[in-house]
Amino acid sequence: MSTTQWDAALAIPVDEDRDHIQGRADAPVTLVEYGDYECPYCGAAYPIVKEVQARLGDTLRFVFRNFPITTSHPHAEQAAEAAEAAAAQRKFWEMHDLLYENQRRLGDQDLRGYADQLGLDVELFDKELVEHVHAPRVREDFMSGVRSGVNGTPSFYINGTRHDDSYDLETLLAALEQAASAPQ
């Protein structure tokens, strides 16, 4: 009899060709975040992640995966699809940042405005959102999170293991520094 394993490890390894990654592939520490653009906790974590990245520099590789919780956040799915539409035009991180910096403004017109602000092909961007071209990618991220034991956002994984402690700056930084100094 086969059973499903639900544990606190990253079920789908980081893939340089698929994932949205900031930092070097050979960095000693990889921080994966499953996030929701409309989640206030993810919004609070956003500047913390930026600070951790600034402090750790080349020691850290950061990966973002979509985990829109549509039951609580009505704009989360469309925002995630907007980030993926921007990714298709090589502007994922710019859109990611705009979405977190403008969390209370994630309506269709807002998303379109961000696309225009980033210099995207807005017509193509609109078409992809209307046709939900990037919904399968968002769902793939979401399901990888479910298989990895994500039960809320933000969820962080450090070198493949879920970080179950606080994600305040000091705690997260200490966990990442400890992972960086651990034997590989």
Image (cartoon, rainbow, N blue to C red):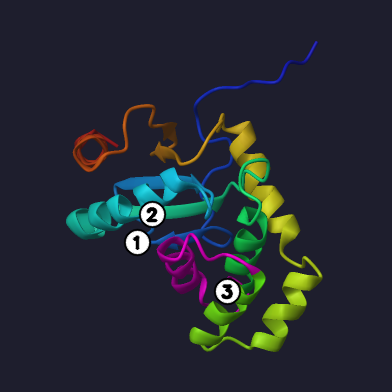
Up-down relation of residue 73 to residue 130 (above or below): above
Question: First in sequence: mark 1 or mark 2?
Answer: 1
Up-down relation of residue 89 to residue 142 (above or below): below
Q: Secondary structure at mark 1?
A: loop
How far apart, in angstroms, are the residues tagged by discs 1 and 3? Answer: 29 Å
Going by the image, does 161 lie left or right of 75? left
Q: Residue at x 50, y 26 (%)?
A: 8
Residue 90 numbered mark, or none = none
Q: Quadrant of residue 121?
A: bottom right
Front position in the image: 160 or 157? 157
How far apart, in angstroms, are the residues tagged by discs 1 and 2? Answer: 6 Å
Disc 3 designates what residue?
Answer: 110
Question: First in sequence: mark 2 or mark 3?
Answer: 2
Residue neighbourhood size for the residue with mark 2, other residues' Cα within 10 Å, grouped as few (<14), some (14–19), many (≥20): many
Query: Can you say which quadrant of the picture contains the C terminus?
Result: top left
Question: First in sequence: mark 1 or mark 3?
Answer: 1
Q: Quadrant of residue 132?
A: bottom right
Q: Residue at x 62, y 67 (%)?
A: 107
Disc 2 designates what residue?
Answer: 62
Q: Position of residue 43 (x, y in %)?
A: 41, 52
What amino acid type is highlighted by mark number 3?
Asp
* Span of residues in magenta: 87-107
Q: Position of residue 47 (x, y in %)?
A: 30, 55
- Residue 95 sits inside the magenta stretch: yes
Disc 1 designates what residue?
Answer: 23
Up-down relation of residue 148 to residue 80 (above or below): above
What amino acid type is highlighted by mark number 1?
Gly
The nearer-to-camera label among 1 and 3 is: 3
Q: Are marks 1 and 2 in contact (CB under 8 Å)?
A: yes
Q: Secondary structure at mark 2?
A: strand
Q: Residue at x 81, y 70 (%)?
A: 131
- Residue 172 sits inside the magenta stretch: no
